[in-house]
Amino acid sequence: MKDQTDIPALMHDIGARAKAASRELAFASAERKHAALIGAAEAVWKNRAAIIEANAEDMEYGREKGLSDAMLDRLLLNEDRIRGIVDGLRAVAEQTDPVGAVMTEWDRPSGLHIKRVRTPLGVVGVIYESRPNVTADAGALCLKAGNAVILRGGSESFHSSGAIHQCLVDGVVKAGLPADSIQLVPTRDRAAVSEMLAMTDYIDVIVPRGGKGLVGLVQREARVPVFAHLEGIVHIYVDKDADPVKSLNVILNAKTRRTGICGAAECLLIHKDVVDTIGQGVIKALLSAGVEVRTDETLRAIEGTVAANDTDWGCEYLDSIIAAKVVDDLDAAIDHINTYSSNHTDCILTEDDAAAEKFFERIDSAILMRNASTQFADGGEFGMGAEIGIATGKMHARGPVGAEQLTSFKYIVVGDGTTRA
């Protein structure tokens, strides 16, 4: 390993080794990749005590930095969460290998047979913040799709990510694949991020996973293509034909299950016809659950709420806070969401099929839901085993980015001495 104080040389070395590994991974068998991921899962579980010990160092570092309770929750690893990491690795391992899959094929009058087949992207750079489980998720998905990956975790998760990374490398090496298939940048120095964003000779795509500040930095400065993942300004609209019980259950889960994830509800829109029924019940339940509810003038009549200001619309709290306002109808809700949404995930609660269809048609977020908690906005819950992030852009990948979304394609053209007139 190069001198860690010479960041350009360090990153050049990492990039060159990743590129070399990617050439071998491009034709690695499905069986070897499966073995690598199963081996990594076994290593994570075997070394769970060491991972939890490393995480304790990170938790102390996070508390010293003044991280919020929600951010500390994102950082925390315990045995249950490590079991989740293991399950995620196994789930990705068992998925169908996307590389080489025929997307479509056809014959031409010229006599040519043409196939479009999935192929790895090459080298993926992943820049993420405090969630150490991303180390496993991103490493596994990139490997499954035949890509080498360079991981740059947040300073808060430095020790946890390092411990998990060692387990991934253990699985990769035992399966006979290059150790450089999954690399972790071994420094907290932010200059490493700037270097990654300019590594056009080595990195084929950058995936940022974190808050608005990180994503904005990557989008502004990257010379490498980026899978955009903006913040999760997640709306739930309670329609006039919403079911009261479903609404209560969904909203409480969407806000309170884990407040620090990007699928947590951040803004509640309530149809004026149900303010005194469903609206009252839901807001009182949120208050009872310890959520701070910032409301418009109409809802301020509910005891315990606080007044919202203009910055509350379009805010990602990642905390036990939610904004709430009354809207005149479905059109007003759609207009509000289209004005303030980050195009991540938005939800309608209604029993009216026509209202749901209009909501789905006129809002262009990556994920749209009906009568379901927005905390399901997750690649694992979509059956992808894990996700490298939620892409909110419209190019190449959108929504949860799993192994299939981490591939490109190439055309295979076969003739029989065929010539063009």
Image (cartoon, rainbow, N blue to C red):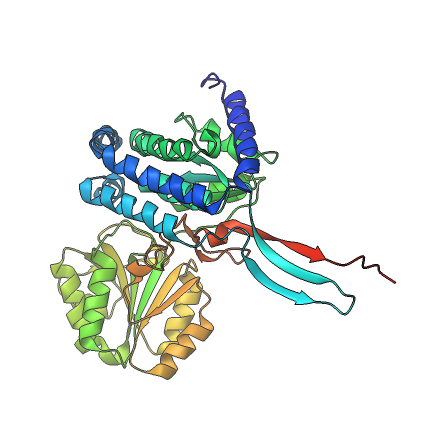
Q: Residue at x 52, y 50 (%)?
A: 99
Q: Nearer the viewer, residue 160 or 64?
A: 160
Looking at the image, residue 247 lies above or below residue 388: below
Q: Is residue 380 visible?
A: yes
Q: Viewer-proximal residue, 284 or 42?
A: 42
Q: Is residue 89 left or right of residue 144?
A: left
Q: Position of residue 9 (x, y in %)?
A: 54, 21
Q: Is residue 131 visible?
A: no
Q: Position of residue 47 (x, y in %)?
A: 24, 32
- Asked where in the image residue 4 lies, by quadrant, the reply is top left
Most extreme residue toward the front is 416
Q: Where, by quadrant of the figure, is residue 175 drawn?
A: top left
Q: Residue at x 44, y 45 (%)?
A: 31
Residue 245 as seen in the image, left or right of residue 139: left
Residue 176, image x, y percentages: 45, 33
Above or below, 405 relative to 366? above
Total labels drawn: 0
Location of the C terminus (image quadrant): bottom right
Measuring from the top left, give residue 223's x and y in whole percent.
59, 39
Q: Is residue 411 above or below residue 347?
A: above
Q: Nearer the viewer, residue 190 or 389?
A: 389
